[in-house]
Amino acid sequence: MNCRFALPPQGTVHLWLYSLTVSPGRIEILHGHLSGEECSRADRMRIAACRDRFVAARGQLREVLAAYLTSPPDSLEFTYGPHGKPSLAGEAEAKLCFNLSHSGDLALLAINREYPIGVDIERVKPGRPYQRLSERFFSGQESSMLCSLPPEEQETAFYVCWTRKEAYLKAIGTGLATPLNAFSVSLLPGDPPALISQSLDPSETGRWNIAEIHVPGGYRAALATLFKEPSVVIREWPIAHAGYNRG
């Protein structure tokens, strides 16, 4: 792939949606992009489908980032934060910040300049015990809001809440060192996406913005960004059609 992309303008987030189900020939190409450490991780996976999904996720991540940096995919180097969040190493880090999420057959990659960013995509699994899960993983405020909804609306609200919480956690890069019940996001129908409280650092609610991302049916997705009014451009990889604006 010989694509070249301009870096996102300040205030703009580029989102790339791609499939983790690819042909054997494509898997071979993507495997060739990986670092020695990534190849070792892949080789330790005994289930072929899991191995191929990992190769598809990391190989295509490298392809997209390489197209912005005009570098070969296999030349990119990553560093990892104290809680495992990856970032580009060296001068490339100053140009691009990224975050990757994958679930089911899809991956969603968020890219912007300068600021940390978080994205989450989740495949909807109908019939889960949403009230019980909310009591275990959500804040008391979020659980109360979800339980106040009619049963037929709780599935959507659960995934709205989950993706917004995960996007925020991935943006700040602390993982579960920040407890899931230490902050709340909006989830009621009609309420705008937002981080509405953060008990560990109340100033966070004024810093982060949450955006709902439109993805294929059967999935939900959300974005957390420091941009006040982000322009979000969504594209598919490999490129199938021109991007379009959301926001």
Image: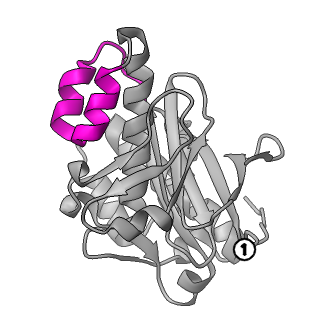
Quarter of the image for the N terminus: give it: bottom right
The x and y percentages for residue 155 are 39, 20
Q: Residue at x 57, y 30 (%)?
A: 190
Instruction: Check disc 1: other Cα within 10 Å, few if <14, some if 14-19, many if 20+.
Output: few
Instruction: Establish if 158 lies above or below 169.
Output: above
Q: Quadrant of residue 52 in the image?
A: top left
Which residue is identified by label 1?
10
The answer to which of 117 and 45 lies nearer the viewer is 117
Q: Quadrant of residue 132 in the image?
A: top left
Q: Residue at x 18, y 32 (%)?
A: 135
What's the image's color scheme? one colour
Helix, strand or loop for disc 1: loop
The kind of residue on which mark 1 rests is Gln
The x and y percentages for residue 61 are 54, 58
Count of residue discs:
1
Instruction: Establish if 126 lies above or below 31.
Output: above
* Range of residues picked out in magenta: 123-148
The answer, for residue 35, to whether it is visible in the render is yes
Magenta region includes residue 109: no
Name the dominant secondary structure of the magenta segment.
Answer: helix
The x and y percentages for residue 148 are 33, 20
The answer, for residue 20, to whether it is visible in the render is no
Q: Is residue 247 left or right of residue 113?
A: right
The x and y percentages for residue 89 are 47, 83
The answer to which of 130 and 62 lies nearer the viewer is 130
Instruction: Establish if 110 lies above or below 165.
Output: below
Q: Is residue 230 left or right of residue 158?
A: right
Instruction: Establish if 244 lies above or below 90.
Output: above
Q: Residue at x 60, y 34 (%)?
A: 215
Q: Is residue 147 left or right of residue 216?
A: left
